[in-house]
Image (tube, helix red, strand yellow):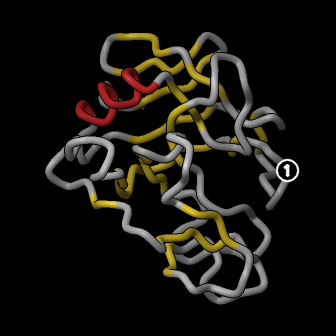
Amino acid sequence: MTPSDMVLTPLGLRFDGRLWPCTIGRGGVSARKREGDGATPAGTHRIVGMLYRPDRMARPTDWAVPIRPGDLWSDDPGHEDYNLMVRAPYPHSHEALRRADPLYDLVILTDWNWPRAVKGRGSAIFLHRWRRPGYPTEGCVAFRPDHLLQIARRITYATRLVVPG
């Protein structure tokens, strides 16, 4: 581990000299992550991107990419676009990135099972806004919205998400 790492602990995420409250997947932490298990995968994950809703917030960093209408994330392990950002119309299983609720107004992307996805190993692990404190995710790590924005602005090229197994 390095000082620039975000480290998941039982009490929250340790990053940049602070402990940030967060929630994780309903399946807990798993070293054997599979599509649909609701687990947050153990391991060290690089930060590979950031997406944001330009109609709802200012660009959080100069490297953040806007989420446009029709932006989706493929979660279909049987398709070649599995675990990649795709565009509508998309007839295969996917998740909308531009949602009616604010859950994905700001999304930090990790390299979990990316860029060459192993089918069935689980699609993207994001850092995103939580629904409410203590409410689990489908495997992502979620934060209070103001904390997520502060974290996003502190990320550097060297930042990684460390999830102890």
User: Which quadrant of the structure image shows residue 91?
Assistant: bottom right
Residue at the spot 63% in from the left edge and 74% down from the top edge: 74
Q: Position of residue 112 (x, y in %)?
A: 57, 57
Residue at the spot 49% in from the left edge and 22% down from the top edge: 144
Quarter that holds the C terminus: top right
Q: Position of residue 127 (x, y in %)?
A: 50, 41
Q: Where is residue 96 in the image (x, y as percent from the top left)?
A: 58, 63
From what the image shows, is residue 159 above or below residue 70?
Answer: above
User: Which quadrant of the structure image shows residue 21?
Assistant: top right
Residue at the spot 50% in from the left edge and 48% down from the top edge: 45
Residue 62 is left or right of residue 39, and the answer is left
Mark 1 secondary-structure assignment: loop
Q: Where is residue 71 in the image (x, y as percent from the top left)?
A: 47, 71
Residue at the spot 51% in from the left edge and 79% down from the top edge: 86
In depth, the one of 6 and 100 nearer the eye is 100
Residue neighbourhood size for the residue with mark 1, other residues' Cα within 10 Å, grouped as few (<14), some (14–19), many (≥20): some
Quarter that holds the N terminus: top left
From what the image shows, is residue 138 above or below residue 150?
Answer: below
Q: Amino acid type of disc 1? A: Asp
In depth, the one of 128 and 49 nearer the eye is 128
From what the image shows, is residue 144 above or below residue 156?
Answer: above
From what the image shows, is residue 1 above or below residue 78?
Answer: above
In depth, the one of 161 and 91 nearer the eye is 91
Residue 53 is left or right of residue 133, and the answer is left
Residue 127 is left or right of residue 42, and the answer is left
How many numbered marks, from 0 up?
A: 1
Report which residue position mark 1 lands on: 37
In depth, the one of 157 and 83 nearer the eye is 83
Q: Which residue lies furthest to the left in this view?
A: 62
